Amino acid sequence: TEVVAVLRSLIDGDMLLPDGRRLQRYPTEGGGREVLKIHPSFRLIVLVNRPGWPFLGNDFFAECGDLFSPHALHNPGLDAEMELLKMYAPGVGEKTLRTIASIFSDLRAKNEKGLLSYPYSTREAVQVARHLESIPSSGLVDALANVFAFDEYDAYVKKQISETLKKYGVPAPSGWNLVGKGGKGGGNLEL
């Protein structure tokens, strides 16, 4: 809430700084404090996650959406995501990058169908590609394990992810014995 309040005051054109100075779009005299004029060309571009689970932060639009012209950015299609991954990981083979893009595309589709609560984004796909670019010897499974580390504790989510990985010929991360309790699946799971 504090960050959103600070952004709102900045966009409103009157922001008090912690040291007592004030930023103002249209400075006024008085008060004995130093007033800094906000440049007339100042613009703020803000990237926010959609409200709700799993992004438990502020509902940005409820707090200050009236001050912005929102534009929804959807995840890129498979070919566009491939091009993006190539830019972040030019040394990683095209087949591997396509596998990464396909895995995350399928996981996002599972989110849209309500099978997964977390909407795996292009951000995670880029993280995997960058990992492989930086440490090629670690392999795809280890790079994916970094992204899915917290999912290891929910048997249902592990099963959904493992099914997607299996579809593309990628084994589940080591240590995912797929035996556990909790989540929608509960009990023992085996693939």
Image (spheres, rainbow, N blue to C red):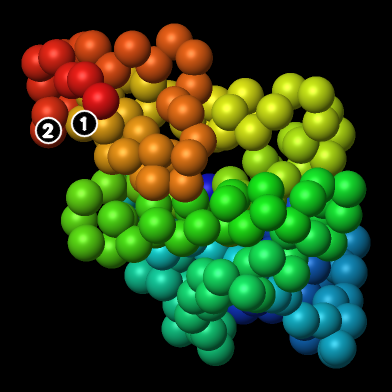
Question: What residue is drawn where x is 31% and y is 29%?
Answer: 158
Gap in angstroms between the C-alphas marked 1 and 2 = 5 Å
Q: Residues within 10 Å of mark 2 (few under 14, many from 20)?
A: few
Indicate left or right for 186 with 138 as reference.
left
The amino acid type of the residue labelled 2 equals: Lys
Dot label at residue 156: 1
Q: Is any part of residue 102 visible from this angle?
A: yes
Give x and y (percent) for residue 50: 41, 64
Circle 2 — which element?
loop
- For the residues labelled 1 and 2, say whether their Cβ atoms are less than 8 Å apart: yes
Quarter-of-image position of residue 150: top left
Indicate left or right for 64 with 127 as reference.
left
Position of residue 102 relative to residue 2, above or below, is below
Question: What residue is drawn where x is 74% and y is 69%?
Answer: 83
Quadrant, the C terminus: top left
Position of residue 188 relative to residue 9, above or below, is above
Q: Where does label 2 land, which residue? A: 184
Indicate left or right for 22 with 8 as reference.
right
Question: What residue is drawn where x is 86% and y is 67%?
Answer: 35
Circle 1 — which element?
helix
